[in-house]
Image (cartoon, grey):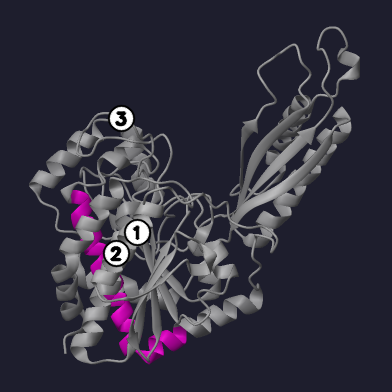
Amino acid sequence: MKNTDSVWECVDRLSGAAIELSDAVWAVPELNFDEYRSCALHTKTLEETGFRVTRNVAGLPTAVMGEAGEGGPVIAFLGEYDALPNLSNEAGVTEHKPVPGNSNGHACGHNLLGSAAFLAAAAVKTWLEENNLPGRVRYYGCPAEEGGAGKSFMVRAGVFRDVDAAISWHPMCFTGVFPPSSLANIRIDFTFEGKAAHAAAAPHLGRSALDAAEIMNIGVNYLREHMLPTSRIHYAFLDAGGTAPNVVQSKVVIRYTVRALELSDMMELAERVRKVAKGAAMMTETRVSDQIISGMANLLPCPPLERAMYASFERLGPPPFDDEDRAWAKEMQKTFPATDIQSAFRLVGQTPRDTSLADFILPLIGGRASMGSTDVGDVSWTVPTVQALGATCAIGTQLHSWQMTAQGKSKIAHKGMVHVAKIMAATATDIIRDKALLDAAKADHAERLKIQPYICPIPDDVGPDLQPVPVAV
């Protein structure tokens, strides 16, 4: 039995349905916990492919799980399908051209992410059936990765407790094993409450919540000098108190995101930010309260699975892009500065070269994929986890940009998602066939948890920010 080649053939046979699913999800971009149509599309495709489907996973209306097979190890493929606000764009164009009527857009490629993860799961399902092998494969459709921490809530609910290994990927402009490094983060809303007054006639009677929020920002800016250089702090006003300058603003809400390479460092830094907020309230004689909105752990490495995935990349080679693909990618590159292209190479530890698409595999060690955050991190603390990077766009394309949205239905994107589905499927079949590989992954994972056990960054009393079910899905 040819393990790798046969599962790749399964991917090719099923790729049409996955491409159709990806394009359909691209056309209905939905935000955190509002992915009702996208989830319905994934659910329908899972049912049509013969998976046993579980809806409302972990009590999340836009989470779904499809399972196939019996006995053996349980391999989970993690998919996503949430979009981003204000990043709409027409597909297949090399200009900023938002789609009328919907400002959302798949600027992080999650239409591709979920569809390729489904394709890999479906291919492994077929491979198990055709070879009469034990093993279970699951596809998890996970909502709200973009700040909503859908998987973190799923982990907290125990969804992945009986999973043996988890596999996922992310669209990018390069191809290789996803460097197992991300920033743990937490989102906290700070509410300052003071006392309204006439800003000219009786300012001495007012206590400004807006002043308190601004002093907090100043304090945090000074804090930046005394935190780890890899940590990050960002903020945005949710409610700046109003638009009347002749009123002392009595209530202000400001959201902070705190990030660090390690979960423990993030929790410590978040507590320091809270102290700054309390100090700002004391200085302005206002009151402050805070509410955690979401949180994510950093990624936990799993070298045995990373080496296995890299071996699949070496066997398969880079995506099969052609001259037409490279020419179109070259046109797309004209829409962003040359510095973006140079930065993309350097981010993954590569010397810039004259190519518009990734025609090479990144080495297993070298560079970071990003300094962003992902709720896959929480899954990685629960079960051995490995991720791939899939080249689906022109080199230099920034995630969370209109250019990423515009390339989401291109031939480049389709070829890249099918290619990475083969990598994920081959990694899964290696795990199923090689008990020593799975044992090594579990042993490595257990040793890491001995050093630092997992602590969910979301308190038990904090629930997801669920959105109402639309009238028609």
Image disc number at residue 44: 2
Q: Around disc 3, counting alpha carbons within 10 Å, would you say few (fewer than 14), some (14 to 19), or many (20 or more)?
A: few
SS at circle 1 = helix
Q: Position of residue 79 (x, y in %)?
A: 38, 62
In the picture, measured across the screen, residue 112 lies left or right of residue 226, that is left
Nearer to us in this view, 314 or 300: 300
Residue 359 visible to the viewer: no
Q: Which residues are magenta?
A: 412-440
Nearer to us in this view, 69 or 362: 69
SS at circle 3 = loop
* Contact between labelled residues 2 and 3, with CB atoms less than 8 Å apart: no
Q: Position of residue 463 (x, y in %)?
A: 63, 58
Residue that mark 1 sits on: 40
State the separation of the CA atoms marked 2 and 1: 6 Å
The answer to which of marks 3 and 1 sits earlier in the sequence is 1
Q: Is residue 156 above or below residue 111?
A: below
Nearer to us in this view, 171 or 341: 171
Task: Inspect the magenta stretch and tell me whether residue 434 lies in it.
Answer: yes
In the picture, measured across the screen, residue 281 lies left or right of residue 407, that is right
Residue that mark 3 sits on: 100
Q: Which residue does the image show at 38% across and 79% down from the upper left?
A: 75
* Contact between labelled residues 1 and 2, with CB atoms less than 8 Å apart: yes
State the separation of the CA atoms marked 3 and 1: 24 Å
Q: Which residue does the image show at 38% across and 66% down from the upper left?
A: 168
